[in-house]
Image (cartoon, rainbow, N blue to C red):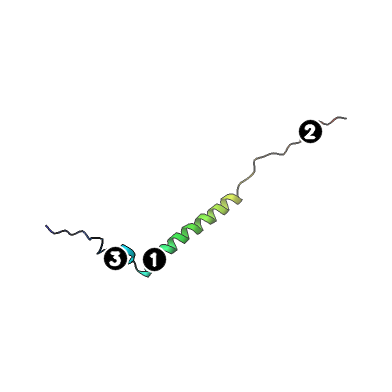
Amino acid sequence: MRNIEPTLDRIEDYDGKESREKRLTIWIVVLSGLLIGAIYDVIQSNSSVSDAIDTNTKIIKY
């Protein structure tokens, strides 16, 4: 019975042999994720509403 599964040496991405296009695609995906996360974080931090109500608790003497 022949072994049909590829070995690590036959896989084109093994041991730093990936193409420049694949490397660029990975960089684009990672940077896109970071950019989307940063935009989401900025929107979330700037859209929070403060629920604190300012009250004057001093007792006034007349």
Which quarter of the image is occupied by the C terminus? top right
Per the rendering, the mark at residue 12 is: 3
Please report the residue visible at 85 percent of the width from the left and 30 percent of the height from the top: 61
User: x, y (%) of residue 37?
Assistant: 50, 55
The kind of residue on which mark 1 rests is: Arg
Per the rendering, the mark at residue 23 is: 1
Q: Residue furthest front?
A: 15
User: x, y (%) of residue 19?
Assistant: 35, 69
Q: Please give left or right for residue 36 compared with residue 19 in the image.
A: right
Distance of label 1 from label 3 (alpha carbons): 12 Å
Q: Please give left or right for residue 24 compared with residue 5 in the image.
A: right
17 or 47, nearer to the observer: 17
Of the two numbered discs 2 and 3 on the same chain, state the one appearing first in sequence: 3
Which quarter of the image is occupied by the N terminus? bottom left
The kind of residue on which mark 2 rests is: Lys
Please report the residue visible at 40 percent of the width from the left and 65 percent of the height from the top: 25
Q: Return the residue at label 2.
A: 58
9 or 58, nearer to the observer: 9
Q: Quadrant of residue 7?
A: bottom left
Question: Is label 3 in a helix, a strand or a loop?
Answer: loop
